[in-house]
Image: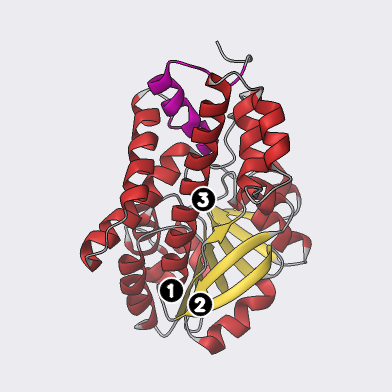
Amino acid sequence: MKIGFIGLGVMGRPMAGHLQAAGHAIYSCANRTPMPDELRKGGAVACATPGDVAAEAECLFLMLPDTPDVERVLFGADGAAQRLKRGTIVIDMSSIDPIATRDFAERIETLDCAYVDAPVSGGEVGAKNAALTIMCGGKADVFDTVRPLLELMGKNVTLVGDAGAGQVTKVANQIIVALNIEAVSEALVFASKAGADPARVREALMGGFAASRVLEVHGQRMIERTFDPGFRIRLHQKDLNLALSGARSLGVSLPATANAQQLLSSCVAHGDAEKDHSAMVTALERAANHFVSVYSS
């Protein structure tokens, strides 16, 4: 199959690689990141514009940072929508505004094309290992068509509901992840300042009901100070903005989410926007005037 894939960054690069490894032809264009050498060597074609990619594609995947990026690639100058062939399926794997997603789906469907929102969870490791969780919104028959492609990139692929339902689920996911990171951060700052070895505290907690993937992976990052990005603070901040704006429109109170957003905003204000979201701990460390780890300076 001829597949367009726009957005070959930290996540998109390995995801497109899995599609290519399965025998699909990849077409892309530079967004923020040029065509990776390994995809080019595998036969991927670099196009000049999103429209040029769309003209070749039977399915068009997007993996972009934010709502305006998706709108620009689809509907901007030289955008993909201008040159989509009838019957093309657009699969947006970005994490963006659910309301905008429903609008994009309606606009694409007026072109006799189809749209699936399919945001992911699992980070860079999940993308590299084809182990992503993929949360989908769209029509059931369209989902059934693209599911084999999605399963090349993920192990848990679920149709949640109509257009936008995938994005709603991703926002819910990001709320849970942020609050877990905040909880682990608070626990390690508390334990460390109380004089306990944070590494041994983490080890002990991993054997009980507090055990979690966040404690396992991000707790270790906090202790070792390995904040190279798997998922950047600025992107998680964006996702919580979506959660809070959606909550306001629904009349829902999300007090813990608002607090986590303040911690992420503190990190951004201190120049840490590009660090991994586990660096949320640094906001609490500043408030406590205490570092979790001896690796800190």
Magenta span includes 274: yes
Mark 2 and mark 1: Cα distance apart in space? 6 Å
- Would you say residue 154 is visible in this rendering? yes
SS class of the residue under badge 3?
helix
Which numbered disc covers residue 271?
none
Q: Which residues are magenta?
A: 273-293
- Which quarter of the figure has residue 147? bottom right
Q: How far from the left and from the top, in percent, is residue 145?
A: 61, 83
Q: How far from the left and from the top, in percent, is residue 28?
A: 56, 56
Give amino acid for label 1.
Ala
Q: Are marks 2 and 1 in contact (CB under 8 Å)?
A: yes
Q: Are marks 3 and 2 in contact (CB under 8 Å)?
A: no
Residue furthest to the top in view is 297
Q: Which residue is mark 3?
A: 177
Magenta span includes 71: no
Q: Which residue is mark 2?
A: 160
Q: Residue at x 48, y 58 (%)?
A: 94
Q: Mark 1 or mark 3, which is nearer the start of the sequence?
A: 1
Is 115 situated above or below 282? below
Which of 169/19 is in front? 169
Q: Residue at x 61, y 77 (%)?
A: 146
Which of 41/7 is in front? 7
Q: Which residue is mark 1?
A: 165
Quarter of the image where the C terminus is located: top right
